[in-house]
Image: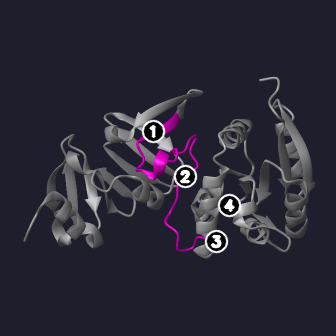
């Protein structure tokens, strides 16, 4: 769209070459304006407040503090959409998964960067930054996310917020450059997979970037049940509750899939299935 406002981007990294790498990548994207750069926590905070960018690529580790320290200083309610840039592998990113549109791990390739950028641009254009700010605030209140549930992930897509304060009715997922809408009531079960949540729909599997805790809160509890810290299942599909050796439990779905039940959630599963002792 020729009349679309430029997306104003701030690049924050203490390494000059890393800043240049991001800037070079953005040079290939139409409608992007580099609002500025910063090389430290104080400089990042000042630049975000002064320049008010639409999107910030924010280094996780910098002199004087982390990326989340920048978020604390600015305030979650005033942060632009954020993509974290980090040298950590994905297993060390629990604290950041909930707090960002996406993240890229150094050294990132062109495809991964483009994926993260396009997702960020889409969320900015859809005005979903407010929902992300709420997730940022939840991370900060949880203390760097150390006690937060393992998150989502950064998938090529995220579950849209339900309208009217109701439960989540559909998921938007990307595949081959297209957005596909998956009705929630067609999802068999959801499994956390590192920084992703995997939606299992029949013999298909779709990835979204959303925390299991968030999904549990946003899905209708009469339809979906969290049976393990990393598994949510559609209750109507549960066929059998299986007890294994050592007191472990599984549910078997009508599709034949077997999913582990954590001991702490066994009673909730029994209640949902109408099982009485």
Local secondary structure at mark 2? loop
Is there CB contact under 8 Å for labels 4 and 1?
Answer: no
Is there CB contact under 8 Å for labels 2 and 1?
Answer: no
Quarter of the image for residue 130 reads bottom right
Pick the front one: 46 or 189: 46
Question: Left or right: where does residue 42 sit relative to residue 110?
Answer: right
Whole-angstrom CA distance, mark 4 to mark 1, is 25 Å
In the rendering, which numbered label is found on residue 153? 2
In the image, which is nearer the foreground, mark 3 or mark 2? 3
Residue 34 shows up from this direction: yes
Category of crowding for the residue at label 2, using alpha-carbon neighbours closer than 10 angstroms: few (below 14), some (14–19), many (at least 20): many
Whole-angstrom CA distance, mark 3 to mark 2, is 18 Å
Whether 155 is among the magenta residues is: yes
Whole-angstrom CA distance, mark 2 to mark 1, is 12 Å
In the rendering, which numbered label is found on residue 206? 1
Residue 176: where, in percent of width, then height?
56, 27
4 or 1: tag closer to the N-terminus: 4
Instruction: Please name the residue shown 59% across and 70% down the image.
Output: 145
2 or 1: tag closer to the N-terminus: 2
Question: Left or right: where does residue 21 sit relative to residue 169?
Answer: right
Q: Quadrant of the N terminus?
A: top right
Among all residues in the image, which is located at the extreme top? 2
Q: Is residue 15 above or below residue 33?
A: below
Q: Quadrant of the C terminus?
A: bottom left
Write down the region rendered in magenta: 144-173
Category of crowding for the residue at label 1, using alpha-carbon neighbours closer than 10 angstroms: few (below 14), some (14–19), many (at least 20): many
Whole-angstrom CA distance, mark 3 to mark 4, is 20 Å
Among all residues in the image, which is located at the extreme front? 164
Residue 64: where, in percent of width, then height?
84, 74
Whole-angstrom CA distance, mark 3 to mark 1, is 29 Å
């Amino acid at each position: 769209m020729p009349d679309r406002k430029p997306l104003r981007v701030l690049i924050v990294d203490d390494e000059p070459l890393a800043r240049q790498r991001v800037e070079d990548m953005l040079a290939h994207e139409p409608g992007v304006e580099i609002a500025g750069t910063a090389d430290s926590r104080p400089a990042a905070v000042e630049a975000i407040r002064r320049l008010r960018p639409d999107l910030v690529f924010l280094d996780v580790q910098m002199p004087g503090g982390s990326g989340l320290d920048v978020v604390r200083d600015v305030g979650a309610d005033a942060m632009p959409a954020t993509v974290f840039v980090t040298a950590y592998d994905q297993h060390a990113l629990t604290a950041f998964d909930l707090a960002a549109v996406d993240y890229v791990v150094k050294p990132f390739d062109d495809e991964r960067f483009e994926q993260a950028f396009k997702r960020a641009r889409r969320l900015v254009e859809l005005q979903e930054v407010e929902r992300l700010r709420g997730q940022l605030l939840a991370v900060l209140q949880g203390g760097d996310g150390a006690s937060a549930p393992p998150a989502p992930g950064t998938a090529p897509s995220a579950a849209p917020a339900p309208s009217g304060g109701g439960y989540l009715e559909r998921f938007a997922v990307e595949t081959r450059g297209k957005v596909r809408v998956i009705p929630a009531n067609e999802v068999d079960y959801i499994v956390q997979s590192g920084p992703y949540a995997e939606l299992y729909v029949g013999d298909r599997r779709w990835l979204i970037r959303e925390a299991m805790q968030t999904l549990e809160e946003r899905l209708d509890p009469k339809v979906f049940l969290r049976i393990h810290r990393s598994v949510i299942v559609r209750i109507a599909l549960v066929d059998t509750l299986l007890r294994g050796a050592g007191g472990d439990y599984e549910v078997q779905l009508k599709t034949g899939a077997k999913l582990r039940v954590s001991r702490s959630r066994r009673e909730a599963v029994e209640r949902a299935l109408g099982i009485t002792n």
